Amino acid sequence: MNEPDVPSSPRVFVLWREAKDTQLRARLGGCYYLSAWLLVWLLGQGMCDHTLAGLIGGVLFFGLMQLRKRHTLPVELTVQNLKRWLNLHWAIILASAFLWGVTAAWARLQPSFDETWALVTLMTIAFSTLHAFNFSMNLKRARLALLMLYVPTLLVMLHQWQQNLSTLITLMFYLSFLLLLLSSSHREYRHTLAIELKLIKRQEALKHLSLTDSLTQLGNRLKFDSLLANMMNNAKRQGVPLSLVMLDIDHFKSVNDRYGHSCGDICLVGFADVMRNVFRRESDTLLRLGGEEFAVLMHNTSHNNAYVLAENFRKALSEHDMPIGEQSIRITSSLGVGCMEIELDSSPNQFVRRIDEALYQAKFNGRNCTVMSSPKRPQKPDTAERNHEPA
Ligand SMILES: Nc1nc2c(ncn2[C@@H]2O[C@H](COP(=O)(O)OP(=O)(O)OP(=O)(O)O)[C@@H](O)[C@H]2O)c(=O)[nH]1
């Protein structure tokens, strides 16, 4: 469960688990089919009387064995890729079962295989038992494999039922037992899978909780720290701009002092709502870094666009009514904005420090304004709509 490549999406996980189990359990099958056929062919009269047929059988079993080995799991774990992989791998498994079933039936018809017939029957029983235990992930396909192993031989035996009556009854009895066994091992497999799925979902929920601020439901400081370096690397690699906006509520202490801590909390939630309304792109990551300090990371967003959005937010916030009991108040925010500069921002800390300085400058300039941190552009704080105290 702790493997790093375990898919977190439940749908992908179920298919991935089935594919991994199928691959693991089918790995040796090809080799056993080939060895069984060679034994049956070499030990009796088969090799002398049916040289060509024996060789063709050997080549076919060898080819199917190679296909099993070479058909590796897809690198990109998507629903489509995994479904395609499972279909093909099952086609190989079913082809092997069918080839054995037909070969066994054919051997039953040839007197040269009379000496090794007991071996053929034992192998059929062994292969079908392994199928019932190992391939319970997919009930329909495993049933089909069992039928492919048995039905050709049973038909031949039915045709010569006087000579084969006891063996025929024994094989049919055993087949019905295997079909029942398969159903119960399929139920067990599904049960184990359901438990694992529950754990995966719980793990995801815990991960989400650990990265989410419980009051505002925005990402928290931990999420910011774990994302920033990755986003900076991605932006560098893709050659796209990465912008960061840092936001701090103005005079928030006086809101708490005047209206109480719970009203302060209402303002924090309202602040986050306005953020969601303005920074709407799916690639925007909205965060509460702590207290009354927030941030937005914007992938593939230029200086200018980030500045425009930051200003839109500042204006929207200053016009947003925060409901405090019977009345409502308005709050303002100061913002620092900047775009990652490869020469300047050698580390995430460096980048954050630069934007934090712009935010500090915005506070210094009188609050309720946005300051852009850019080596190319002069800082242009908009002081037209300053609002020092909450209304
Ligand atoms: N209600 C509430 N208040 C909080 C929370 N976290 C921090 N605060 C308060 O936020 C206030 C921050 O005060 P300061 O750091 O002085 O900042 P400010 O009053 O906004 O002043 P400037 O940032 O300089 O405009 C403090 O009173 C904290 O108690 C919280 O989760 N809920």
Image: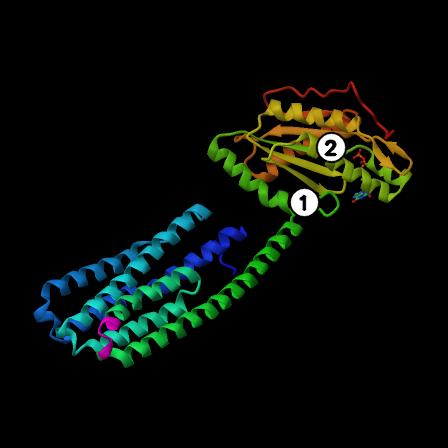
Q: Is mark 1 within 8 Å of ligand 1?
A: no
Indicate whether 364 appears above or below 172. above
Point 65% across, 35% down: residue = 296
- Label 2 – label 1 distance at C-alpha: 17 Å
Q: Residue at x 84, y 27 (%)?
A: 388
SS assignment for the magenta stretch, majority: helix
Across and down, in percent, residue 174 comes to 36, 76
- Tell me, yes or no, whether the highlighted magenta stretch contains residue 24: no
Q: How far from the left and from the top, in percent, is residue 340?
A: 57, 31
Q: Residue at x 68, y 27 (%)?
A: 310
- Disc 2: CA contacts within 10 A as few (<14), some (14-19) or many (>=20): some
Q: Which residue is mark 2?
A: 274
From the viewer's side, name the closer residue of 56 and 74. 56
Residue lying at the far left of the rendered structure: 48
Mark 2 or mark 1, which has the lower sequence index? 1
**Which disc is residue 220 wearing?**
1
**239 shown above or below 50:** above
Q: Can I make out residue 246 in this image? A: yes
Q: Position of residue 194 (x, y in %)?
A: 55, 61
Relative to residue 148, is residue 271 drawn left or right? right
Q: In this rendering, would 54 be left or right of 17?
A: left
Query: Is residue 160 in the magenta section?
Result: yes
The residue segment tinted magenta is 157-162
Q: Quadrant of residue 58?
A: bottom left
Asked if 162 appears above or below 279 in the picture, the reply is below
Amino acid carrying label 2: it is: Val
Q: Quadrant of the C terminus?
A: top right
Can residue 374 be seen in the rendering of this structure? no
